[in-house]
Image (tube, rainbow, N blue to C red):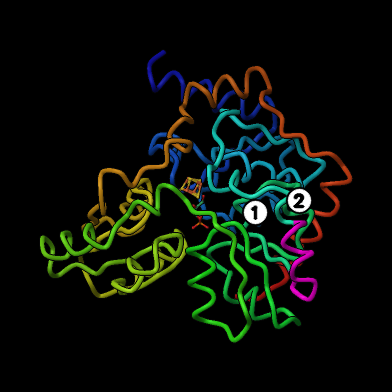
Amino acid sequence: MQQADLIKRIKELKLKRNAVILSHYYSRPEVQDIADFVGDSLALSQEAVRQDAEVIVFCGVHFMGESAAILSPNKTVLLPEIDATCPMADMVNVEGLKKLKEEHPEALVVSYVNSSAAVKAESYICCTSANAVEVVNSLDADEVIFVPDKNLAAYVAARTDKKIIPWEGHCPTHHQILREDVLRMKEKHPQAKFIAHPECRPEVLELADHVASTRGMIVYAKKSPAHEFIIGTECGLIHGLLKAAPEKKYYCISEFACCPSMKMISLEKVLVSLEKMQHVVIVPEDVRIKAKEALDRMLTVKV
Ligand code: 13P
Ligand code: SF4
């Protein structure tokens, strides 16, 4: 089917199913373009609650669809690609987390939203890259277990007086951005500001002019007087940057800054998802209730 026909059919089915399409900034450009809302993890969680559609087609990885299903149990949340999982979210499991909790009985658990519903259910509060520092600093505890991203944990540890107990997880896409990549790009584009996501290694973040979530990076690039930016995150973000501030230039940090899971979601799969009403995200009710408490706590923290 031609792209125009695919888009027409998706729009028709969206109306028929009373559905909305939510997309993360790392999705393919054509997928972002058919979405009703494109955002970072925090904004997508908030939007899932705000929408009054019966069906949410979530163009993002599994944990994002799960968060929407946890927060909005009366809506049907569909994932166009069931195998689009986040490798970092899979790096932490409930057994390991329970063991760490036993070793640190005084600590509160903060789980990055890039985690399973079961891990969220074992956590006191969730956070995203947009609010991690504020979430940790809001806690009435001196010790915090932070799972699963060790790079985000290090970023937070440098901005809090609390003791951060990290988990050994990382995002393969961000972790393979190296200091040498940044230095090479800075030499090639000496006028450009380097903006980076806190999932990058500490030695990469040290070189950044600004560190922020994906949405935070867009806000910064738009407001900044600079005209050129080296983008230290998944390069799908450049589509959103070009929409927000098309007069500026954006350079992808490296050809490897690509999340294979996000790129699995295509227009064809969005169409099939709406046609067959697949793949429905199911979270067991006992897990959902506990995970919702952790997400709800996060949503009350002011950023
Ligand atoms: P944000 O959307 O919170 O910036 O997170 C990036 C990410 O890696 C999502 O998987
Ligand atoms: Fe997971 Fe990294 Fe992909 Fe985000 S970019 S979904 S953290 S693997």
Looking at the image, residue 90 lies above or below residue 185: above
Q: Is residue 167 magenta?
A: no
In front here: 45 or 103?
Answer: 103
| Quarter residue 163 falls in | bottom right
Residue 224, how many percent across, how many down? 30, 73
Amino acid type assigned to the residue bearing label 2 in the image: Leu
Residue 225, how many percent across, how many down? 25, 75
Amino acid type assigned to the residue bearing label 1 in the image: Ser
176 left or right, relative to 69:
left
In front here: 212 or 89?
Answer: 89
Residue under circle 2? 71
44 left or right, relative to 196:
right
- Disc 2: residue Cβ within 8 A of ligand 1's nearest atom: no
Looking at the image, residue 258 lies above or below residue 251: above
Residue under circle 1? 45
Within-10-Å neighbours for mark 2: few <14, some 14–19, many 20+: many
| Quarter residue 275 falls in | top right
Q: Which segment did they paint magenta? A: 98-108
Question: Is the residue under label 1 in contact with that under label 2 (CB below 8 Å)?
Answer: yes
